[in-house]
Amino acid sequence: MEFKPEIKYRRLPLVALAGRPNVGKSTLFNRLLHRRRAITDPAPGVTRDPVEMDAFIAGKPLRLVDTGGFKLDREHPGPGGRGPARRGLAGAGNSPVLDDLVVERTLEILKRADLIVLMFEAGELTPEDEEFIELLRPFGDKLIAAVNKTEGGRREAEAWNLLSCGFEQVYPISAEHGDNVGELEAAIIRRLDFSQVEEDRTDQRPIRIALLGKPNTGKSTLSNRLTVSAASIVSEIPGTTRDVVEGSFSWKGRDFLVLDTAGIRRKNKVTENVEYYSVNRAIKTIGNADIVFLMIDAEEGLSDQDKKIAALAHDKGRGIIMTLNKWDAIPQVKNTFEAVCDRIRFLFGKMEYAPIVPVSARDGTGVDKLLDTALKMYRQLSTRIETAALNQALEKWLEEYPPPMGPQTRFKVKYAVQSSDNPVSFIFFVSRPQAVGEAYISYLRNRIRRDLGFSLIPVSIELRASGEKAKRT
C-alpha cells in the first residue's frame, strides 16, 4: 500500500518516546513531526500530558506520543539507610499525587505502544538510567535505544556503552540539530507493522463526544449509561473524575467515542495541583471533540462557568448541546421547560443555535433524543457546500440585503468559498474587509445557517481581500 502524507489514516502503529526528564523527548518529537508541537524547555518535567500526533516518517504514517518525563526518586532512607524507591515527575513544586498520575498515564501508553524509543543523554549512565532500563525490561522486544545530544560526534563513543545493557543497537542522535535522526527514523519504520493501516474515511470515524461542565453535574453517570460500563467512578464528591476517561458505544449504526472529563470550577476555586492539571485536560478535550455535551444541573441552574465552557466550544467551532441533567427532579409544571429555555437563550446570547435537551442520566430519560440530536448535528458539521451553489445563494442574499453605500461603509462582496468542515468555516472575498460591520457579518452567518443547513452549529466567517490579512469573526 502506498501512503500519501496528505491523506489521513487510522489503525496506525503507536510509537512512544520515553525517558527520564530533560533528555530531549519533546525536541525529538517536534523533529519527527517536522513542526513545533510539544513545549520544550531546559527545566525538567515540562511535559505532563502525553502529547499524541499523527506523523509521516520515511514515507510511512504512524501515531507518535511524547510521554511525560518521570524519574525514579529515592525517598529519604529509613532505618539502616534503606528506603523504597518512588517514581515521580521531575521538577519543582509537583505533588506526589500529580507525580503518580503522570507515571500511571505514561506506563499506560508504554503498555499499548507498538514501539518505544527509550532516550538517554550522552555521557555515563546514571543510576536512574539503569533503574529505568530495569523498569522497561518487560517491554524489551519493542525497545529502541537512542542517545541524544551527540551533535558533531560529541561523546558518541560513550553511547555504545548501552550495548552492555542488552540493547542490540544504539542510535546516537542530536534531536536539536538533526544529526543521525534519519537513521533512527529508518530503524523505527523497520520495526513496525503497517499491514493494518487503513485510509481514514470521514463516514467511518467515530463521533467524538466530550462531556463538560461543573463538578457533580452527572457527567460520569451519563458516560457510564452511554457506554454500558462503570469505567468512570461515580461519587457525590465533586471532582472525583480527574483524568479524561474514554469509552465507546454505537447508536443507530454510528460509532461514538465519549470523553468523560473532570468538572471545571472557577479558577479561584481550584486549589490542588492535580485539579488544575485535570481541568486543563478537560478544556483541551474540547479541541479533540466533535460535539460537546454541556452538562447543566437542572436543579442548580446556570452559572458563569457554563457560559465560559460554552464560549470555548463555540470559539473552536464545536457542536454544543445544552444537556439539562437531573430533569426528573424538576417539578413538571406547565411551561417549565420553555421558561428554562428562555433563561438559557438570554444568558448565552450568540448561541441561540445550540439545542437544549432535558435528560436524566440516572434513569435514561431523554438520552435517545440527546443522541439523535448529536447525529443530526454531526451531519451538519460534516457538510460541505459546493462553491457554485454557495455563490448562487450569495447572489440572492446580496439582492435581498445589499451592502451599505456610504463613502466610509461601502464594500463589495465578490464571492465566497467554504474553507473547512468540522469546524465549519467560510471565506468571503470583499473589496474592503475593514468596512464590513458586525451587523452585516451576522446577516451572512444567519443566512448560511437558515438556507444551507447549518442550523444547529457554530459557523465561522473570514473576510479576505487580496494582499490583506483575514478578519475572523
Image (cartoon, rainbow, N blue to C red):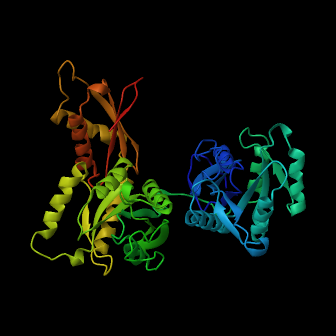
Q: Which residue lies most toward the front here?
A: 79
Quadrant in which residue 99 is drawn: bottom right
Q: Kindly give the residue lying farthest to the left in the view shown.
A: 334
Looking at the rendered image, the quarter that the C terminus falls into is top left
Nearer the observer, 164 or 431: 164
Q: Position of residue 293 (x, y in %)?
A: 35, 63
Which residue is depicted at the point 78% across and 40% down? 179
Q: In the orientation shown, which residue stands out farthest toward the bottom?
A: 363
Viewer-nearest residue: 104 or 53: 104
Describe residue 23's horizontal placement relative to residue 381 as left or right. Answer: right
Q: Is residue 190 visible?
A: yes
Residue at 60% x, 51% y is 46
Question: Is 65 left, or right, of 246 in this rendering?
Answer: right
Quarter occupied by the N terminus: bottom right
Percent coordinates x, y for residue 317 in the rendering: 37, 49
Q: Position of residue 435 (x, y in %)?
A: 26, 25
Please say if 154 is above or below 86: above
Residue 193 in view of the camera: no
Position in image of residue 154 (x %, y %): 85, 40
